[in-house]
Structures are given as C-alpha cells and as structure tokens.
Amino acid sequence: MGSVETLAAPQIRRRPLHAEVIDRLRDLIVQGALAPGARLNERVLCARFGISRTPLREAIKLLATEGLVELLPHRGAIVSALQPERLAETLAVMGALESLAGELACRHSSEAQVNEIRALHYEMLAHHARGDLGAYFKYNQQIHLKLVEAAGNAVLLHTYRQLNANVRRARYMANLSKERWDQAVAEHEEILAAFAARDAERLKRLLREHLASKLASVLGALGARAAA
C-alpha cells in the first residue's frame, strides 16, 4: 500500500468565497427571489450567507457588470429592472450568435461533444419531469454554452458569454409558464436531433426560433405585470 505522499489523487479545488457568493446571489435574482427594484441590504445578505461585507461587495460589483444589479451613488445597490427594448435588442444579437454557433458546431464538433450535450439534455429532461425549474435551468444553460463551445471559435464564445450574462434572468422567466416550459423542452428535442444529424440549416433556424419564442414569452409577462 502506498504512502500518503505517493498516492496519486487530484487536488481538492476550493472556489474563492466571492465566486460562491456571486452564484448564490445571481440565482436569487435570476429566479425572482430578489425582485426588480429590491434593495440589496448588505447586513441581511451577509447574515444570510454567513460572510463578511468584502466578498459580498465584490459579488455585487460583478453582477452590476452583468446587468442584474444597479449601483446607486451613496445609496447602495438594487436589483435592476428588465428593459423590454434592450432585451429585444440583446436577444436579436444572441439569436445571430447562436445561429452561427450552430452552423460551426455542425461542421467542427466531435462525436464526443454531441454525446456530452445529449447527456446534459437527458439530465435536463429529468428535472423537467420533476418540475424543478432551478435545476432544469442550470442544465439548459450548460447545453447552450456547450453548443457554442463546440463551434470552436474563441471570439464567438467570449462574446456569447458576455451577452448571455445580461439575459440570463429573461431566459429563466421565459419558462415560468408551464405551457412555455413544455414547448421549450420540445424545441430542445428538435435542436438536439438537428445537431446530432449535423443539419446546419435546420439547427440555425431552430436556434433562432427558440430565442424568438423566449423573447415573446418574456415580453408578454412584462406587459402583463405593467398592466396589473
């Protein structure tokens, strides 16, 4: 039996505290637990997460760059409101990026990458069956990211990551309706089939339509809130 020194094992990776705080605070905003306009009370959040103010403030600053938080001079920070016009413009660009990513992925991706996305898809379906939207959404986001990664274009991937951070909350909101959520799952089935078949033209069209459906759903929800 080998000694502790000779045992080969991967090192335990510890995430920086502020990175963990970013994820948890982002989830609260994306999933609506912290509503638009809500003040980010540092004392309350520090107590909730069991942290000091330094990592919390770092997290808030990063989330401000993602458009989830608005920093108010001398007044702290609030959850930013979704702006329909900006959202429509951003998703239009996202649609073009995902369409290009789909075309390149059909051309350059390996069978291993297709299988990885297929495995994520099945995990996503399992969470849909359980009605667990939070877990479903995490796999959903991984699928879209992996598809862009499969395109093999670093500039495209970087641009996509930046823009997707700004619309993550809207993409989550799009599935709050059970009807729309079920529709999104059906669309993902078609997207996976087109990708596996390397049908670039079909995949490009499906990805554009998928985002267009999300936009229509979110704008409808925002309109209903404004009218209420």
Image: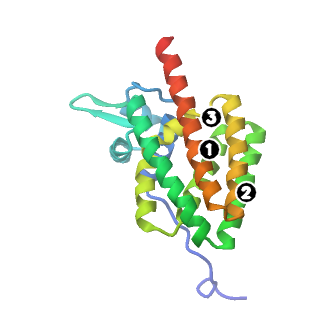
Front-most of 104 and 158? Answer: 104
Q: Residue at x 53, y 17 (%)?
A: 224
Q: Position of residue 120 (x, y in %)?
A: 69, 56
Q: Is residue 45 above or below residue 205?
A: above
> In screen coordinates, is 37 left or right of 203?
left
Q: Residues within 10 Å of mark 1 (few under 14, many from 20)?
A: some
The local crowd at label 3, few if under 14, some if 14 to 19, many if 20 or more residues have their Cα within 10 Å, is: many
Residue neighbourhood size for the residue with mark 2, other residues' Cα within 10 Å, grouped as few (<14), some (14–19), many (≥20): some
Circles 3, 1 touching at the beta carbon (< 8 Å): yes
The amino acid type found where label 3 is placed reads Asn
- Give percent across and percent down for residue 185: 71, 43
- Using the image, determine if residue 143 lies above or below residue 179: below
Reading the chain from its start, which is encountered first: label 3 or label 2?
3
Q: Which residue is mark 1?
A: 137
Q: Which mark is residue 193?
A: 2
Residue type, numbered disc 2: Ala
